[in-house]
Image (cartoon, grey):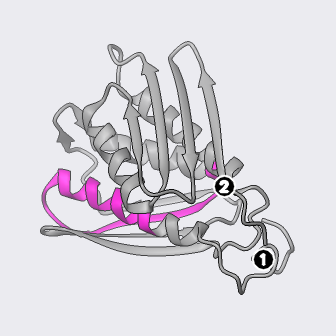
Amino acid sequence: MSQGKRQAKKTRKTSETEITVSLGLDGKGTAKVKTGIPFFDHMLNLFARHGLFDLQVVAKGDLEVDLHHTVEDVGIVLGQALVAALGKKEGIRRYGTAHAPMDETLARVAIDLSGRPYLELRGLNHRGRVGNFPAQLVEEFLRALSVHGGMNLHAEVLYGRDGHHQIEAIFKALAKALEEAVRRDARVGGVPSTKGSL
């Protein structure tokens, strides 16, 4: 099992956004994030901190039009960086599950780094807003991450009332579940699949 550093840098440039993401899976939770969307920056910072990922995100988007393009495209590039950092996925646990409480809210996230993307998101108040950040964009981010990260991703707010707490609990549970899924396990020989590849 390779013990090399698992890190990657990816860039995406379109007429709507220009985004660069650097991701280190075996980090200490340090983050440098600048998307122009303060609440989203906060979520990405805590994602890095609680997942022990070293993360840098620089995003310039058409925020005067909408936040949607920037949030979705960050999810795309983060997913691409994850795939590149994982390489052949040898020796990883593959699956991760975490619960995260946030005051009155409890969220659960389960991940399978199967290479087969699928998102199931339940319980989030999609119509809410945190400042100028629409809660609906959480789904757009998670879908982009799932598709481009090749992960089966299930996220659920089990209960809770405050929109900020709901979103924060999802991001924290996402971080912990992903940290578990990418974690190396000396007992895993090769790729963790009976098919021989992921």
Instruction: Determine the residue positioned at 56% across, 46% down.
Output: 23
Closest to the camera, between mark 1 and mark 2, is: 2
Query: Where does residue 96 sit, x and y in percent of width and height?
Result: 52, 73
Q: Name the residue nearer the viewer: 132 or 96.
A: 96
Q: Residue at point 60% right, 20% down?
A: 13
Front residue of this view, candidates 49 and 193: 49
Q: CA distance from mark 1 to mark 2?
A: 20 Å
Q: Assign a secondary structure to mark 2.
A: loop
Residue marked by disc 1: 193
Amino acid type at image mark 2: Arg
Q: What residue lies at 38% left-to-right and 45% top-to-bottom?
A: 44
* The stretch drawn in magenta includes residue 31: no
Q: 114 or 191: which is nearer to us?
A: 191
Q: Image height check: is 131 above or below 127?
A: above
Q: Is residue 143 left or right of residue 198?
A: left
**In this rendering, position of residue 50 left or right of residue 6:** left
119 on left or right of 1:
left
> Seen from this angle, which residue lies furthest right?
196
- Quarter where residue 141 is shown: top left
Q: Quadrant of the C terminus?
A: bottom right
Considering the numbered disc 1 on the image, is that residue within a helix, a strand or a loop?
Answer: loop
Count the marks. 2
Q: Amino acid under label 1?
A: Ser
Task: Work out whether residue 13 can be spotted.
Answer: yes
User: In the depicted view, which residue is nearer to us: 13 or 116?
Assistant: 13
Residue pointed to by mark 2: 6
Magenta stretch in the rendered image: 149-176
> Quadrant of the rendered structure where residue 135 is?
top left
